Image: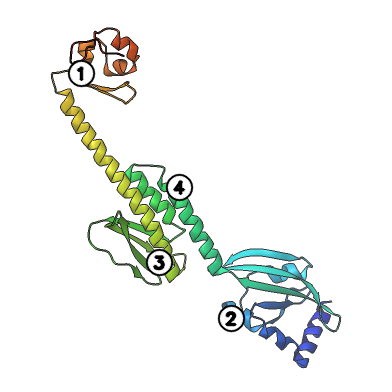
């Protein structure tokens, strides 16, 4: 069978019929059944990697296996392989493998998936250090082999080379830093599409970083105000719109006879009100 397969391709070569395969835009391989030897590769197949092909495909087809839409990551490419046994015009059988290069399509899909995951992951924490770790986890290896985040108020211009790209971290109209991504050991190379996707990642990251900063500032102001109120000799309380207590300083705790601020805040409002006569500005009972 193997000898016959080789003979069939040889006769087609002499007749010029195999040249028709060179007109096809997709890579096509003709395989000798039994041995797995590649008998012919069209021009598109030769252009993939200098005549080298993903290992194992020819051998599988030579054993009679059928390959249907199998995705293969090979040498920085993503290929979809199909293969099986075909009958040549003279009635003899050979194996055939076709390959479709979907590298750009798959890269775009992965970038979109990475950005969707980024939005959810960056919303999980308002701690700046944790958010920076999350950015690194999202960027590597999806967007690069190395990731550097620099927080600075200096202007940042996007930069793109095969091994490195830089995009500004911009939040609420201001540049707060820059995101640098580097390709090293993977051998991958950046393109204009990567620059655009990385800028989207930077935009999401910058907003998360800015949110962390705002929360930290609010917490610092709250702690400062709390320290001031704790030092006031008069009792001070704060109530929510529904009337429940949400804050009481130490003076209020002592005045109301509770062991701690936590105990006071946990007490039912009715219990607190029942201990006092509450009057309006005119001295009339206040309806509660």
Give the CA separation, mark 1 to mark 3. 56 Å
The local secondary structure at tag 2 comes to helix
Look at 38% across and 42% down and name the residue there.
Answer: 125
Query: Dot 1: few (<14), some (14–19), or many (≥20) neighbours within 10 Å?
Result: many
Give the CA separation, mark 1 to mark 2. 79 Å
From the viewer's side, name the closer residue of 203 and 164: 203
Q: Are marks 4 and 3 in contact (CB under 8 Å)?
A: no
Q: Earlier in the sequence, mark 4 or mark 3?
A: 4
Question: Which mark is on residue 195?
Answer: 3
Which percent across, then down, holds residue 91? 86, 80
Which is more foreground, mark 4 or mark 2? 4
The local secondary structure at tag 4 comes to helix
Q: Which residue is mark 4?
A: 120
Q: Earlier in the sequence, mark 2 or mark 3?
A: 2
Q: Which residue is mark 1?
A: 250
Locate residue 63: give its quadrant.
bottom right
Which is more foreground, mark 2 or mark 3? 3
Q: Earlier in the sequence, mark 1 or mark 4?
A: 4
Locate residue 8: give its quadrant.
bottom right
From the viewer's side, name the closer residue of 35 and 237: 237
Q: Earlier in the sequence, mark 1 or mark 3?
A: 3
The local secondary structure at tag 3 comes to helix
Q: Are marks 2 and 3 in contact (CB under 8 Å)?
A: no
Give the CA separation, mark 1 to mark 4. 41 Å
Locate residue 253: give its quadrant.
top left
Question: Which mark is on residue 47?
Answer: 2
Which percent across, then down, holds residue 269? 33, 15
Give the CA separation, mark 4 to mark 2. 41 Å
Please say if 69 is above or below 125.
Answer: below
Give the CA separation, mark 2 to mark 3. 27 Å
Look at 77% across and 65% down and name the residue there.
Answer: 65
């Amino acid at each position: 069978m193997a000898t016959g397969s080789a003979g069939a391709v040889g006769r087609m070569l002499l007749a010029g019929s195999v040249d028709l395969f060179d007109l096809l835009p997709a890579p096509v391989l003709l395989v000798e059944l039994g041995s797995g030897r590649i008998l012919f590769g069209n021009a598109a197949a030769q252009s993939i990697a200098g005549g080298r092909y993903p290992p194992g495909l020819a051998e599988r087809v030579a054993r009679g296996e059928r390959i249907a839409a199998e995705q293969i990551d090979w040498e920085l490419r993503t290929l979809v392989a199909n293969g099986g046994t075909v009958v040549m015009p003279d009635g003899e059988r050979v194996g055939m493998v076709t390959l479709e290069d979907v590298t750009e399509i798959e890269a775009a899909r992965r970038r979109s998936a990475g950005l969707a995951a980024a939005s959810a992951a960056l919303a999980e924490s308002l701690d700046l250090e944790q958010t920076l770790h999350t950015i690194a986890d999202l960027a590597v290896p999806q967007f690069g082999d190395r990731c550097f985040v620099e927080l600075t108020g200096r202007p940042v211009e996007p930069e793109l080379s095969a091994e490195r790209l830089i995009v500004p971290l911009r939040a609420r109209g201001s540049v707060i830093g820059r995101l640098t991504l580097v390709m090293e050991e993977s051998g991958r190379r950046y393109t204009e599409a990567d620059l655009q996707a990385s800028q989207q990642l930077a935009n999401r990251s910058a907003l998360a970083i800015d949110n962390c900063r705002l929360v930290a500032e609010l917490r610092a102001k709250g702690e400062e105000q709390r320290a001031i109120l704790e030092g006031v000799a008069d009792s001070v309380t704060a109530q929510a719109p529904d009337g429940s207590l949400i804050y009481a300083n130490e003076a209020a705790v002592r005045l109301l006879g509770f062991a701690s601020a936590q105990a006071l805040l946990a007490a039912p409002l009715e219990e607190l009100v029942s201990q006092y006569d509450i009057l309006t500005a005119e001295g009339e009972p206040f309806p509660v």
